[in-house]
Amino acid sequence: MGLELYLDLLSQPSRAVYIFAKKNGIPFQTRTVDILKGQHMSEQFSQVNCLNKVPVLKDGSFVLTESTAILIYLSSKYQVADHWYPADLQARAQVHEYLGWHADNIRGTFGVLLWTKVLGPLIGVQVPQEKVERNRNRMVLALQQLEDKFLRDRAFLVGQQVTLADLMSLEELMQPVALGYNLFEGRPQLTAWRERVEAFLGAELCQEAHSTILSILGQAAKKMLPVPPPEVHASMQLRIARIP
């Protein structure tokens, strides 16, 4: 069995892995895990990842369950262009610096709107408005830090070429955009960065990867989304309760 990637393109890290593999011509089989249908909580998927999360990489008997580890593994195994994960010690350290900050400041923050606008209402849960406003404030602060600390006057987050840092960041920032919050508005520097990253990745690939999330609000409004099965409601409610 060749390389298998377990993905749901509603998931930001899933999209990052998918785009990376496609952009670099890495052969893989897609194993779709439909989160809205609760497939990530199934016994079958639990045998692949007991953490019940996507993305997952399966390379023969070898399994990885964290997106950054997956991207680094793919970068090394398939010897992709050096700019993605630079061999230069300091440049690589800067990629890791960003990814560490990203995990603490971006990852848990920019996905909240999907829960407040789509996933919560699907199971009859409304997130308090004060949490929504607090999340918006946290996004504004993180965006300012992203520009001041990492982007600064550079073309990309770690210098003058695209790295794993840019890909991970773009996918997180696209989540609130798709949910109706254009966080790039009024931020010309960040907008120019997004345009450079998307131009490098290619419009067709970006559209392919983003089509699912970009259509989610419309589908929700038309009640076209599947209602998650009752057995996943408790885990969803717990995730919503953890929104600060």
Image (cartoon, grey):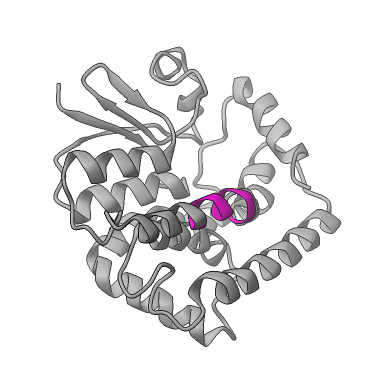
Front-most of residues 8 and 62: 62
Which of the 4 image quadrants contains residue 29? top left
Front-most of residues 215 and 111: 111
Q: At 38% across and 79% down in the image, what residue appears?
A: 155
Q: Is residue 158 above or below residue 120?
A: below
The answer to whether residue 88 is left or right of residue 230 is: left
Q: At 69% across and 25% down in the image, what residue appears?
A: 234
Number of marks in the image? Answer: 0
Q: At 41% across and 74% down in the image, what residue appears?
A: 194
The answer to whether residue 240 is left or right of residue 30 is: right
Residue 115 can be seen in this image: yes
The answer to whether residue 220 is left or right of residue 130 is: left
Which of the 4 image quadrants contains residue 55? top left
Front-most of residues 90 and 193: 90
Which of the 4 image quadrants contains residue 217? bottom right
Q: Which residues are magenta?
A: 98-106
Q: Main secondary structure of the magenta part?
A: helix
Residue 45: in magenta span: no
Q: For the N terminus, which image quadrant?
A: top left
Q: Position of residue 49 (x, y in %)?
A: 44, 21
Q: Is residue 94 above or below residue 238?
A: below
Q: At 47% across and 60% down in the image, what residue appears?
A: 169
Farthest front residue in view: 89
Q: Position of residue 149 (x, y in %)?
A: 57, 71
Front-most of residues 124 and 105: 105
